[in-house]
Amino acid sequence: MIEIIHGELSNMLPQCFESCLMEPESLRETGIRRTGRICGKFQNSFNVEFSAMQNNGETSFLLHVGSLSRPLCCFGLSVAAEEMERLLLSCEEGSAVTFKCGKLMVYGRGVQFRMDLADRAGFKRKNLRIKENGISGVSTAAGLKTEYENGIFGLLKREIEGGGWQGRMGLSWDNDFRKYAAVLAGRSGAADKQKAAVYFAGRGRGLTPGGDDILLGYAAVMKAAGQEEVFSLSEYLPLQLRLGTTAVSRAYFRALDDGFVNEDFRDFLLCIFEGGENRAEEVIKRIKGLGHTSGHDTLFGAYLALIRLIEQDRKE
């Protein structure tokens, strides 16, 4: 058995373990473990799907296991690159994974890996929670004045409006796309926003379709700005709509409902709302490198949200 002692753990996971994976008393007595399977193997990571009834009605829980060389996933953990390499060499699609008493066991070909994720173990918890209403103690408007338009918003505006992004995104910029993007960027009513959510949800290809990424980027900025009354995923994208998209997208939607985003996007939000504009170019570049189109799609959604917030500030 190979013990993986050190790594990082999203601070979202302990509450997920408690609500989704912690065995009830009857299971503890019989020694039965929660069992999952590797359901997606990639160059630097893999996903594990556990069967678990969640309080939002979903019937599975997704765990991402990645490398410390990459940004931490909000529903995941990371280990050293060399340990990740050994895991990937030994495991395959369908390999068994178990969770019991805070310990994660991964069953590879002829070898087992064990990670102790309990409190005070060697996995450091990293804060990936959105700092809602936490814009340096001031109003949303103060974080989005002209100087910020020359910072992270200005960078996005110049890139997107300068052309070239259409070919890097997962959705075609046809008339419907432009129509519903304008709905998100404008002061539309609830009915129109619902139609925009329906249009984008699950639209596109890949592990996270482009439309999902746009909604995630948009809703995350709104949540960080304390503007969930303008657009809330839980309100405009209920479970019946989420079931039409991928398991990975649903995991991100659930994480955002609970107030968590990936490490790199949390850095992006801090750049917007807490004066980190000097790092803006670096953070945007890092996010653009995610997936085939996911980074660009997510940033486009964030850009629509910033337009909405700036226009709101001007009219108030």
Image (tube, grey):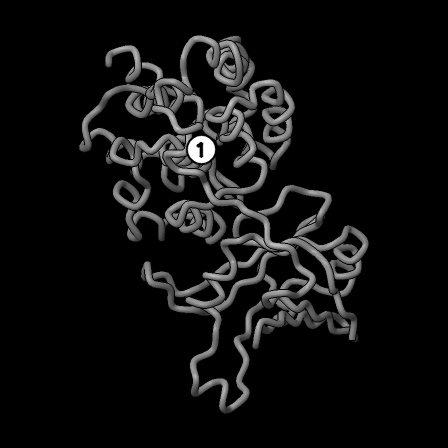
Labels in figure, total:
1
Between residues 150 and 162, which one lies in front from this camera angle?
150
State the image coordinates of residue 22 (x, y, percent, origin top left).
Answer: 48, 73
| Residue 39 in picture, x, y percent from top left | 58, 60
Element carrying mark 1: helix
Can you see residue 149? Answer: yes
Few, some or many residues within 10 Å of mark 1 (<14, 14–19, 20+) = many
In the picture shown, does residue 196 fall above or below 17? above
Looking at the image, which residue is at 56% across and 33% down? 267
Check the image and report above or below for 195 versus 111. above
Between 90 and 105, the one lying in front of the other is 105
Left or right side of 6 for 281: left
Answer left or right for 153 relative to 68. Answer: left
Question: Where in the figure is residue 307, as x and y percent of width and height?
Answer: 37, 17
Q: Residue at x 75, y 56 (%)?
A: 84
Extreme residue toward the front, this view: 137
Residue 103 is situated, as x and y percent measured from the top left of the image, at 62, 72
Q: Quadrant of the C terminus?
A: top left
Does any portion of residue 163 appear in the rendered image?
no
Q: Amino acid at mark 1?
A: Gly
Q: What residue sits 65% from the left and 53% below the top?
A: 8
For the N terminus, the image quarter is: bottom right
Residue on which the image places disc 1: 217
